[in-house]
Image (cartoon, rainbow, N blue to C red):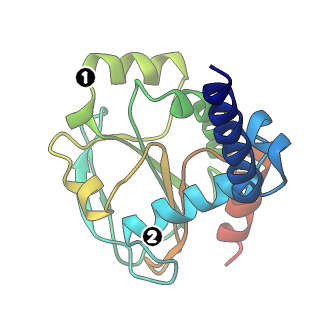
Amino acid sequence: MKRNGFILLGIALLLGVALYQNSDKGILSWFTGASERKSASISATALEKSGLKPGGEAPAFSLTALDGKTYQVGGKREKPLLVNFWASWCDPCKDEAPDLVKLADKYKSNLDVYSVNVTMYDKLSKAKDFVKTYKMTFPVLLDEKETAYRKYNGVAFPTNVLIDRNGMIQDVIIGLISADELDRKLAKLVNL
């Protein structure tokens, strides 16, 4: 009986040492989730898997939007572009939507925003409800066959791709970032 207790104590000690050595800021950050580097590496890993690279040419696609018009991405354009890939069931997309709407309105004279619902992984009725709930006024494109999302090697929702006037990718944001950080990135994009 005592022997089993010593074995369990040894396992607990080894587990504690392993957790401490593998956490950025010690054992406390593992329990509280306070590791900033950890979330950055998850994003870096997702970006690496996507294969998108800032400085590369934005893959071209055209999709029909909820307004019935066809929108194109790729090549030179009058304004820089934010392409936002999302799905209605995605909680981070719900968190991001109000900020995206405000920022799209703030930059509307200097920036195009195309919100791409990856409808293959969603339901059209849910996407329409999402657009109505968050009062999205920018074009909402429907990627019904996942063609655009595949071209951008999508790995997670939301994914935001910032494209300059020359059709070059300037930034790729996989996952949720703060409204202030997105605002800074958009300000930089429109001033290129």
Residue at the spot of label 2: 48
Q: Is residue 1 visible?
A: yes
Q: CA distance from mark 2 to mark 1?
A: 29 Å
How many discs appear?
A: 2
* Viewer-nearest of discs 2 and 1: 2
Residue 27 position by quadrant:
top right
73 left or right, relative to 48: left
Lower position in the chain sequence, tag 2 or tag 1: 2
View extreme (left): residue: 145
Mark 1 nearby-residue class (10 Å; few <14, some 14–19, many ≥20): some
Residue sitting at 79 percent across and 34 percent down? Answer: 32
Mark 2 nearby-residue class (10 Å; few <14, some 14–19, many ≥20): few
Q: Which mark is residue 123?
A: 1
Picture layout, residue 147 above or below residue 66 = below
Q: Position of residue 180 (x, y in %)?
A: 79, 48
Q: Position of residue 16 (x, y in %)?
A: 74, 44
Q: Position of residue 15 (x, y in %)?
A: 66, 44
Q: Are marks 2 and 1 in contact (CB under 8 Å)?
A: no
Looking at the picture, which amino acid does disc 2 mark?
Glu
Q: Quadrant of the N terminus?
A: top right
Looking at the picture, which amino acid does disc 1 mark?
Lys
Residue sitting at 55 percent across and 47 percent down? Answer: 175
Q: Position of residue 12 (x, y in %)?
A: 69, 37
The foreground one among 166 and 37 is 37
Q: Quadrant of the C terminus?
A: bottom right
SS of the residue under disc 1: loop
82 left or right, relative to 25: left
Q: Is residue 111 visible?
A: no
